[in-house]
Image: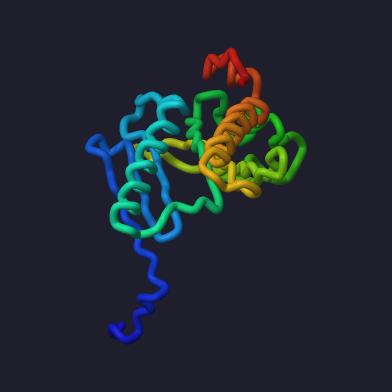
Amino acid sequence: MTPESLDLANYLPRVWLVAEGQDKLLQLQDDRFFFNWRRMQEYEAYPRYSTIIEAFKTNLGIFQEFLKEERLGTVKPQKCELTYINHIPKGEGWESLSDINKVLRDFSWDSNERFLPVPLSLGGQVIFPLPSDKGRLNVTLQHGERKFDKFPILILQISAQGLRGDKCMDAVWEWFSVAHEWIVRGFADLTGAAIQKDIWYRTDPT
């Protein structure tokens, strides 16, 4: 590839800023500002939403001040996203994919009196509307393996996307509150009562 063939005008660089503990990550692009938490240790507890959203607000505020000082414009929100990724290992409520309904009550695989055996893998997607035309809730299920030991897991990702209407920062934070509620209550609505009680010891669905 020659320099003349590079389309620099449409090149969107991505910058990663990683915290010292490697568990927090900022991703900057020309049209995106992402703040991620990622589990680095097997038994590391998930932080509460309040911790994550405050860290996001702090870092976005720092970025906004940088743009102001350097006269680079301002952040103009167009779309927001909040995503939870849940890894459910084999043995936590399921042993084979024929047990999928014990994890997700709307999915099932009945192996009785049929030609096909229990599947080796499965996946699916369901999309729900958020209230007041605020966007949508996207639920995806995949069957995979943990990176560090190749142990079978179910990967349940629940992602709220949208904004619409008023796009001021107050509207942004209100959108995130709605998105968080729908992800948490949606997770409780989708997953089986037994696995919530016996495996996750969940007592409050909200």
**Residue at 73% from the left image edge and 45% from the top image edge:** 115
Q: Between residues 2 and 35, which one lies in front from this camera angle? A: 35
Q: Nearer the viewer, residue 45 or 116?
A: 45
Q: Where is residue 71 in the image (x, y as percent from the top left)?
A: 33, 58
User: Quick check: can you spot residue 156?
Assistant: no
Asked where in the image residue 93 lies, by quadrant, the reply is top right
Q: Could you tell me which quadrant the C terminus lies in?
A: top right
Could you tell me residue 29's position as x and y percent? 39, 57
The image quadrant that residue 61 belongs to is top left
Residue 112, given in percent of the width and then of the height, sits at: 74, 34
* Residue 41 image offset from top left, x and y in percent: 31, 30
Count the numbered circles shown. 0
Q: Is residue 201 above or below residue 95?
A: above
**Residue 48 shows up from this direction:** yes
Horizontally, is 154 left or right of 182 in the view?
left
Q: Is residue 72 left or right of residue 116?
A: left
Decide: is 43 above or below 121: above
Residue drawn at point x = 41 percent, y = 27 percent = 51
| Left or right for 101, reference 46 | right
